[in-house]
Image (cartoon, rainbow, N blue to C red):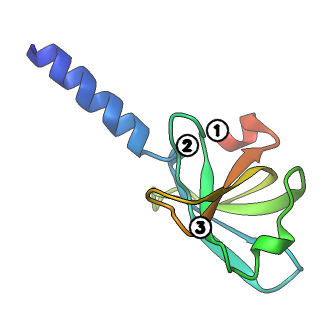
Amino acid sequence: MTAIEVNTSTVSKLNHSLPPAGFYSVEFAVDEPHPLYQFKIWHSESSPMFVVVKENSAVLPKLKAGSVLNMTYYSSDAQCPKKQIETRIGHISSERKGRFQGHCTIDLVPINQATFQN
């Protein structure tokens, strides 16, 4: 393996470990105005952005695939302000084994990708 191959592999792994657009967490309320729920943003090759919720969480029954919520995204860059973005709840999967066993993964799909990236 050459140095270029190693560096390409390292850059690829680094890119997959960073959340989209530099956001590290999301916050939202299902029943306005409270309670507020905050989750770390995860991503994988198969899902660009998702959150992980315990199967027995009080918020889980309130989240339905296809529903749209106004979510506040927090950046990993302290210089960037938080952003309010309309987000559609995507696929909700119950994880029976692996890293997220006992949790559900919930895909997040920003409605306006241009707003999300800027």
Residue that sits furthest to the bottom in the current view:
34
In this rendering, position of residue 109 left or right of residue 47: right
Snapshot quadrant of residue 37: bottom right
Report, in whole angstroms, how far the alpha carbon at label 1 lies from the one at label 3.
28 Å
Q: Which kind of residue does numbered mark 2 sit on? A: Ala
Can the viewer see residue 29 in this picture?
no
Say which of 20 and 9 sits in front: 9
Q: Which kind of residue does numbered mark 3 sit on? A: His
Nearest to N terminus: mark 1 or mark 2: 2
Nearest to N terminus: mark 1 or mark 3: 3
Can the viewer see residue 13 in this picture?
yes
Q: Are marks 1 and 2 in contact (CB under 8 Å)?
A: yes
Q: Are marks 1 and 3 in contact (CB under 8 Å)?
A: no
Which quarter of the image is occupied by the C terminus? top right
**Element type where label 2 sits in the image:** helix
Q: Which residue is label 3 attached to?
A: 103
Which quarter of the image is occupied by the N terminus? top left
Q: Which residue is label 1 attached to?
A: 117
Q: Which kind of residue does numbered mark 1 sit on? A: Gln
Say which of 52 and 7 sits in front: 52
Where is residue 5 shown, x and y percent of the image? 19, 16
Q: Which residue is label 2 attached to?
A: 21
Residue at the image point whose x is 85% and y is 60% from the top: 69
Residue 7 vs 95, above or below: the answer is: above
Report, in whole angstroms, how far the alpha carbon at label 1 lies from the one at label 2.
6 Å
Say which of 28 and 5 sits in front: 5
Residue at the image point whose x is 29% and y is 30% from the top: 11
The crowding category of the residue bearing disc 2, from other C-alpha atoms within 10 Å (few below 14, some 14 to 19, many at least 20), is: few
Residue 6 vs 62, above or below: the answer is: above
